[in-house]
Each structure stands twice: as C-alpha cells, then as structure tokens.
Amino acid sequence: MLEKYIIKRYIKTISKPARTGRWHKVPHITLVYSFRLREGVKDWDIAKIIQNIASKYRLVKFHYDGFEIRRGNKGYVFALKIKPSYELKKLRKEIYREIKPFIAERPDVMEHNDFDEDEFWFHATIGYRLSEKSVNLLKKKIQSKYEYLLASALRITLLKKSKIRYEYDIPTRKLLNRRKALSRKYYAEMVKMHREILQIETPQRPSLSSKGRIWFISDTHFELW
C-alpha cells in the first residue's frame, strides 16, 4: 500500500551515500529465516500450512517506528523498526511452530526463529552487509529523519531462491501461485477487500448515474512529493 512506496523511496535515496553492502528493492518483514524443505515435502505443503493458519486472521496490523541499525555476522543491518501487534506476533509464532517439523533450518538462524513473541526482531531491512563507514554515513543521513507509518500485513510470501513460489492473500483469503501473486487483477482484488475490511469502501458502489441524489467529497489530503 502507500507505506510500501514510501519505504521503496527510502531505499532508493538513503542507499546512495553508502556504496558498500546490499540493498533490498522490495520492503518486507521476515517471519521465518532461511530453511530448506525436508525430503518428500513440497512447496505446496508449506503453502497450505500457511493458508490454514493465516485464514484465522482478517486484519494484521503493525507500525513502522523509526530506523534501526544492528551488527550482524557479516556486517551491519540498516532497517525500519517494526512495532508488531499481538496478531502479527502470534501469526509468526504459529506459522513457525507448524512448519518446523517439515523444514531443515540453517544453523545460524535456528535460535532467531525459535524466539518467543516478545524476543523476535521484527524489522524491514533496507540494507545489509554494510561496512562501518557506510553505517556512519547513514547515521548522518537519517539524523533528522523519523518515520512513523501505520500498516497492515496483506500477503504472506513463500520464497525459494528469492523468487515467489506462493503467496497467501490475507484480505481475500486466497492462496496464489507465482503468476497470480504478480497479477494486477489479484492485487486490485486484495486492495478492494482490504478497504472493505477497514470500512472505507462499500461492498457495492452505487451507480454515479443515479438521479435525484447529491454527491459530495470532503477532507481530502494531498501530499506533494
């Protein structure tokens, strides 16, 4: 939604002064760190587990709350801090618990995946494997910046080699393959349903050609970019 494009703008502008490291093009929150499937387990099996769990949730809110820098095993991580809701924390823990018997985790991430709801680091990575020099440049760049954005988790993505295998669409409760996940049609359906859940769009819009009615609009807020 809107916050996605704001974050993508940050990735584009903030990363310019820091030349070392790697930068994400699409903002996301990692729920379960690196793993591979055990023998005999298919991508579809994991996708169905995600669907079964996530279908219990209708609205998963959180908010971005400023920037965060942490030191990792291979350099620094620069991210947007996430303040998760109870639903997001519970959703992550449930997904991990249910898929754990079917996956083999990378040894260096097992501890992080197993953290409880209040210990897990929720964040949206902007850059990683950054040098100390890059981090110091970033600190100066964001010194006067602060970002607070309300947001909702709309899709849960199963990735394989950094490519979408399946996505579960939370508002429409549909499990999408890669083609559908990248489709504008299904994206539009998701947005429409999300707006209905938030009660900012009626399920069926009245016809604008109706006679004898007065139409008005108010409280518009426009921002110049």
Image: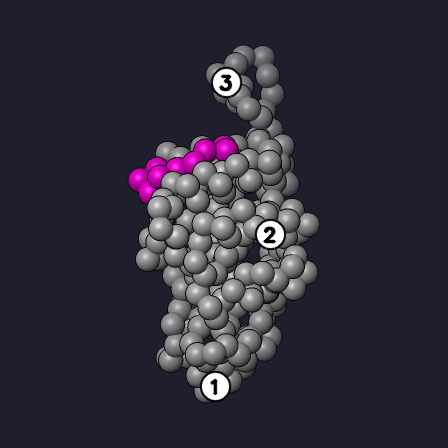
Which of 143/124 is in front?
A: 124
Q: How many marks?
A: 3
- Kindly report which numbered mark, 1 or 3, lies closer to the viewer in this rendering: 1
In this view, 219 is above or below 117? above
For marks 2 and 1, the one nearer the N-term is: 2
Residue 60, given in percent of the width and then of the height, sits at 60, 45
| Residue designated by label 3 | 207
- Pick out the residue farthest to the top: 211
Mark 2 neighbour class, 10 Å CA radius: few under 14, some 14 to 19, many 20 or more:
some
Cα separation between marks 2 and 1: 33 Å
Q: Position of residue 75 (x, y in %)?
A: 46, 80
Q: Is residue 171 above or below residue 94?
A: above
Q: Quadrant of residue 177?
A: top left
For residue 52, side relative to residue 131 (left or right) = right
Q: Residue at x 38, y 40 (%)?
A: 44
Give yes or no for contact between labels 2 and 3 (Cβ–Cβ under 8 Å). no
- On the question of residue 123 being in view, the answer is no
At label 1, the amino acid type is Glu
Q: Which mark is residue 132?
A: 1
Report which residue position mark 2 lands on. 93
Three-letter code for the amino acid on which mark 3 is drawn? Ser
Question: Which comes before the other along the chain, label 1 or label 3?
Answer: 1
Which residue is rendered at x = 44% and y = 79% of the image?
74
Q: How is the image coloured?
A: one colour
Per the rendered image, the range of residues in magenta is 171-183
Callout 3 environment at 10 Å: few (<14), some (14 to 19), or many (20+)?
few
Between circles 2 and 1, the one closer to the viewer is 2
